Image: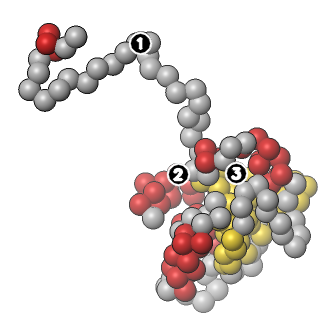
């Protein structure tokens, strides 16, 4: 939920820019506490639908509780559902218009295979939209071989 305060504005911009529109059927993978699911529900509106999936039962409990207490006017947001599923083994009853996710790919052992599978759930011409970080390879510039943090009270010249 803290991530939402930081990322929701740029996530909304990315989803809208990618083509998320009213009436779409959306799958939010790695939904966690539901922030991106709720954001997508506002964008696709009451004629769309959003399903959030996550492997963590506690996250889904939180998402469902938050969904039950949301104060939106009638007809303002898409219907939302949450389901427990492990990525990439997501199974749906039909294709979706969009598969979305935020900060989930870095948690997968094989994100490329997961994206291939998830893209098969999207109708032809649909959207696959993820907001994530490329953490590989991590590097330091300029390159250093060893870094020794100074101990409290020491001066740099005292370090070996």
SS for callout 3: strand
The outermost residue toward the front is: 160
Residue 145 numbered tag: 1
Q: CA distance from mark 3 to mark 2?
A: 13 Å
Q: Are marks 3 and 1 in contact (CB under 8 Å)?
A: no
For mark 3, does the 10 Å Cα neighbourhood hold few (<14), some (14 to 19), or many (20 or more) residues? Answer: some
Q: Nearer the viewer, mark 2 or mark 1?
A: 1
Measured from the top left, where is residue 99 in percent x and y? 74, 58
Measured from the top left, where is residue 142 in percent x and y? 42, 12
Vertical placement of 21 versus 138: above or below? Answer: below
Q: Which quarter of the image is occupied by the C terminus?
A: top left
Q: Which residue is mark 2?
A: 10
Asked where in the image residue 46 lies, by quadrant, the reply is: bottom right
SS for callout 2: helix
**In-front residue for pair 15/142:** 142
Q: Is residue 124 visible?
A: yes
Mark found first going from the N terminus, 2 or 1: 2
Q: Which quarter of the image is occupied by the N terminus?
A: bottom left
Residue that appears at 52% across and 51% down: 10
Q: Are marks 3 and 2 in contact (CB under 8 Å)?
A: no
Vertical placement of 97 versus 6: above or below? Answer: below
Q: Nearer the viewer, mark 3 or mark 1?
A: 1
Q: CA distance from mark 2 to mark 1?
A: 36 Å
Q: Is residue 34 visible?
A: no
For mark 1, does the 10 Å Cα neighbourhood hold few (<14), some (14 to 19), or many (20 or more) residues? Answer: few
Q: Which residue is mark 3?
A: 129
Residue that appears at 20% across and 23% down: 150
**In-front residue for pair 72/138:** 138
């Amino acid at each position: 939920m803290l991530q939402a305060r930081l990322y929701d504005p740029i996530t909304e911009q990315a989803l809208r820019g990618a083509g998320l529109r009213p009436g779409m059927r959306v799958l939010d993978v790695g939904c966690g506490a539901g922030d991106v699911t709720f954001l997508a529900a506002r964008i696709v509106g009451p004629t769309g639908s959003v399903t959030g999936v996550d492997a963590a039962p506690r996250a889904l409990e939180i998402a469902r509780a938050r969904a039950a207490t949301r104060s939106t006017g009638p007809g303002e947001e898409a219907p939302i559902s949450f389901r427990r599923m492990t990525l990439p083994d997501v199974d749906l009853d039909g294709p979706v218009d969009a598969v979305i996710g935020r900060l989930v790919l870095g948690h997968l052992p094989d994100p490329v295979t997961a994206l291939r599978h998830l893209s098969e759930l999207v109708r032809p011409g649909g959207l696959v939209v993820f907001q994530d970080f490329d953490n590989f390879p991590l590097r330091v510039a300029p390159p250093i071989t060893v870094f020794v943090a100074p101990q409290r009270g020491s001066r740099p010249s005292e370090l070996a």
